[in-house]
Image: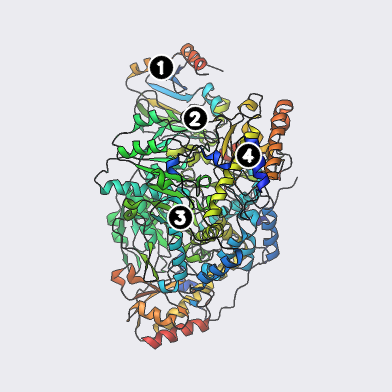
Amino acid sequence: MSRYIPNTHTDIQEMLEKIGVSSIEDLFVDIPKEVRVNGNLDLPEPMWEAQLLAHMEGLADKNETIKQNTCFLGAGAYDHHIPSVVGHIVSRSEFYTSYTPYQPEVSQGTLQAMFEYQTMICELTGMHAANASMYDGATALAEAAKMACTVKSKDRILISKAVHPQSRKVLETYARFNGIDVVEFGYRDGQVAMDEVEQMLSEDTAAVIVQMPNFFGIVEELDELGELIHKKGALFIVSVDPISLSLLKPPAEYGADIVVGEGQSLGNPLNFGGPYVGFFATTKKLTRRMPGRIIGETMDEDGRRGYVLTLQTREQHIRREKATSNICSNQSLNALTAAVYMAVMGKEGLSEVGDLCLQKAHYAYDKLLQLDGVEPMFNAPFFKEFVVKVDRPVSELNRHLLSSDIIGGYDLGRDYPELEGGWLVAVTEKRTKEEIDMLAEKVGELL
Amino acid sequence: MKNRPLIFELGKKGRRAYSLPQCDVPRRNTKELLGENIIREEGPDLPEVSELDVVRHYTNLSKLNYSVDTQFYPLGSCTMKYNPKINEDVARLDGFTSVHPYQPEDTVQGALELLYAMDGMLSEITGMDRVSLQPAAGAHGELTGLMIIKAYHENRGEGHRHKIIVPDSAHGTNPASAMMVGYDVVEVKSDDRGCVDIDTLRDIVDNNVAGLMLTNPNTLGLFEEHIHEISQIIHDAGGLLYYDGANLNAIMGMARPGDMGFDVVHLNIHKTFSTPHGGGGPGSGPVGVKQDLIPFLPVPMVEKEDNRYYFDYDRPLSIGKVKSFYGNFNVLVKAYAYILSMGAKGLKEASQNAVLNANYLASMLKKYYELPYDRYCMHEFVLSAQPQKEKGVSAMDIAKGLIDYGFHPPTVYFPMIVREALMIEPTETESKETLDRFIEAMIELAKMADEDPDKIKGAPHKAPMKRLDETRAARHPVLKWERDS
Amino acid sequence: MEVREDLKYSKDHEWIKIEGNKIYIGITDYAQDSLGDVVFVELPEVGEEFDAEEAFGVVESVKAASDVYVPISGTVVEVNEELEDMPEKVNEEPYESWFIAMEIEDTSELDSLMDWEAYRKFCEEEA
């Protein structure tokens, strides 16, 4: 028997006797013969522990990592430093082997940590309330659009083309099956084309969605846009990079009604794309329309402060087809990761990370622009990521860099044919001047 | 008694837990770089604590949780089985954690190989033809599966089909997911054996039916014995059959949804395949389909050609993307390791012992509680505390009472068709000794309900907290900490 | 269980107070008791129109949510905003805690409602 199954032969016999059957097979009488599996499933022979470890290491070794290479790739997933403490805390099995905190008396660890997480997200975004996480930034954005349509009883969404292509694709899928009409508006010099929004914004628009900084790394000016959207009675949805909010104004200040984003940057490993964590925050007025789990403060019978899952009537297990969303499991452990990360970095640390990214990204930008064959693509302020135009195919450039153990930037031509040759380069606090100089040197070699 | 401090209430200005490099590039003025108008006046008010403060705070918090590693956790429909440690180890390998999702395919062949193999193994286990690994959780899998069903009907010119049938015993996610794709939900009631009422089903079904969502074994822990007939009724009407895999742990290696006539399946990797629940997530909810539905699976799929793996985005009938990147990859790494550890024989033994353990508990407890459907169960069963309720002790009181015995409570008040429901799922990873201690506790609680009901109503007495006031939390929501409060 | 003689009642356990062609709607003592602690009341906006039997709001306890219906068609002219901050009033004083006031056109529609005696009997049967 597997080491994960403790029943011995004697145990099994004793239990069968108490049940009153002669074999385990008898317990499966309800499964009709014709749907039974004959013999064994066709799966690989079981591996013992050392063999499994060797096999897994073999697979892992076939992947290049950001530890063997210097990473200038971002585009929604970032190589920020993860403090050692973070891994230690989230590896405590009292956290990772528990379930959704349905029984608050024996789940205060998860509940309080999530309450603190919600507080931190509100602090970053300036919003009134946050939920305890969504699957990722893209699904959080799609759910925000759906929520806006329900709140406004309208079914048209405007979204900026400078929002992450994956988020737009996920929104498109959710919208298609929900009868929501999604219309994209363009960008000018890398920023929201206000005149297009103005033209497209109509009385039947439920919400307008922008990303900040946008997919090109560019910092948008959104005060005016917020006013315009509200004047037309629509909601303003902003998708944000949480690290940028150490330096940039909280979206509440420019009128956001719903703020979502990808929380990977906050201490979560790159993990080849997941699990990450979507955050979701909104205004007081819309709190009860939010999807997902929410933790609230209360008291126990002794009058001590404690935490519980609350506003549950919004959720599927109570409201069924009338729920605000179908979400049940979320990304709690990744939200915990984000919370521990923010606790470690603190007010000063997070701002320093933001500032280091900003400074180093600008140094890299200037350095690259000194090269022949590298041109600016846009002329707009950016945070930790920027676009330059290179006069060789981006894939060729990235191949060249990889041979020098550098993972190059994102090829914008993949999603924006009009930006062929656009190279989206991310520079986090981890990149040193030396590495940036090396990047410029290697790019210079090819161009 | 003093309140436990929040992390915000610890620390003071100037204290730090972080380590960062000096800026090694020439500094420029932040306002000039970003523009004055967009700069934040003051940084976010995050905690200012030392590294030890952080470690101690969260370590102490963790000790307030019940968890699989510390307690028996018989939470029905959640399959709280042991989460093997080797899986955690392999998932932490740099080659899995430190890989960027946009790296060139040639640099991620190991990851793609794993995903491809996972598709194959899960297809084999469920009897389906292909599996998408993208959905992030069970409910996300349901959403994806229903989108596939809708796209399939639309592609056949049958977009008028707007009804999804769900049993009254179904998980709340089923109707909620159907709503998310714009379907109307029609409920079918259960018969007196706890299964779908076939006659009612016949009455409901017409050519507007898009599909039926079924958990099998269902949430009462009972196998739908008439699955063949159900499948025929739905298919004859042109509908599709959807398998909610929440309870797959009962039947691995014994029976396959694909062989029962299901067209679409979602799995809960974090239940059946031993990956930890993480206090509510991350999970993973792969979706498997039969041949005819493969074209509609979300993009991308991993394909193999000449020993090279690649992402296939060229799928014109695909429903599109449902999540960023490729699903909860690191969760899948753990499940992959689990399947390789268990093999075909091990998975079958897991299901057999899960079923054995559940039946053992049911047979020992049915004298003390009501067992509304007295049949052999599969991996879980539902008791009713109605006899106790009549003495003033509710299912919730029993649940809280169990806490004092060091057990996590079962799922309570679900499924809704059983009054005072206690839904118990022991899983295969618990020993007979643990089950016996649980039985003893349940019997004592039943006796207490008879003799000293007030004692249970005050439970838990030994937990980190007394019962919490959920009414207060919902009436006047406090959803974040405020500095002045 | 309290039933007031001066009110009319619906099968959905709402009470209706009639003042000319204006009616006030709330939920009965029986309804609040079976719901348990009310934690939230969701109300429509002034000016919204409803058809008979249409849901105009939701009343919630911790673990349940029930729609509340307008017994006859009309237009909302007032909503009781006090309930948004003090949902407990619905438990404490169900017959003072009106949810909305509506203006109705066809008062004959009111004839289908139960009087207090019929409603009391209705509740006894339901229990």
Q: Residue at x 28, y 36 (%)?
A: B207
Disc 4 packing (10 Å; few <14; some 14–19; many ≥20):
many
Q: Which mark's residue is nearer the viewer, 2 or 4?
A: 4
Q: Which mark's residue is nearer the viewer, 1 or 2?
A: 2
Element class at badge 2: loop
Q: Residue at x 43, y 61 (%)?
A: B326
Q: Position of residue A138 (x, y in %)?
A: 42, 57
Marks 2/4 same chain: no
Q: Which mark's residue is nearer the viewer, 1 or 3?
A: 3
Query: Which chain hosts label 2?
Result: B
Asked whether, in this view, residue B403 is left or right of residue A125, the answer is: right
Q: Position of residue A376 (x, y in %)?
A: 36, 78
Q: CA distance from mark 1 to mark 4?
A: 60 Å
Query: Which chain hosts label 3?
Result: B
Q: Which mark's residue is nearer the viewer, 3 or 4?
A: 4
Element class at badge 1: loop
Dot 4 amino acid type: Leu
Q: Position of residue C15 (x, y in %)?
A: 46, 21
Image quadrant in which the C terminus of chain A is located? bottom left
Dot 2 amino acid type: Arg
Q: Residue B193, labelled with which disc? A: 2
Labels in figure, total: 4
Look at mark 4 in the image and give the residue it sits on: A16
Q: CA distance from mark 1 to mark 2?
A: 40 Å
Q: CA distance from mark 1 to mark 3?
A: 58 Å
Asked whether, in this view, residue B342 is left or right of residue C107, the answer is: right
Q: Residue at x 62, y 33 (%)?
A: B395
Asked whether, in this view, residue B271 is left or right of residue A219, the answer is: right
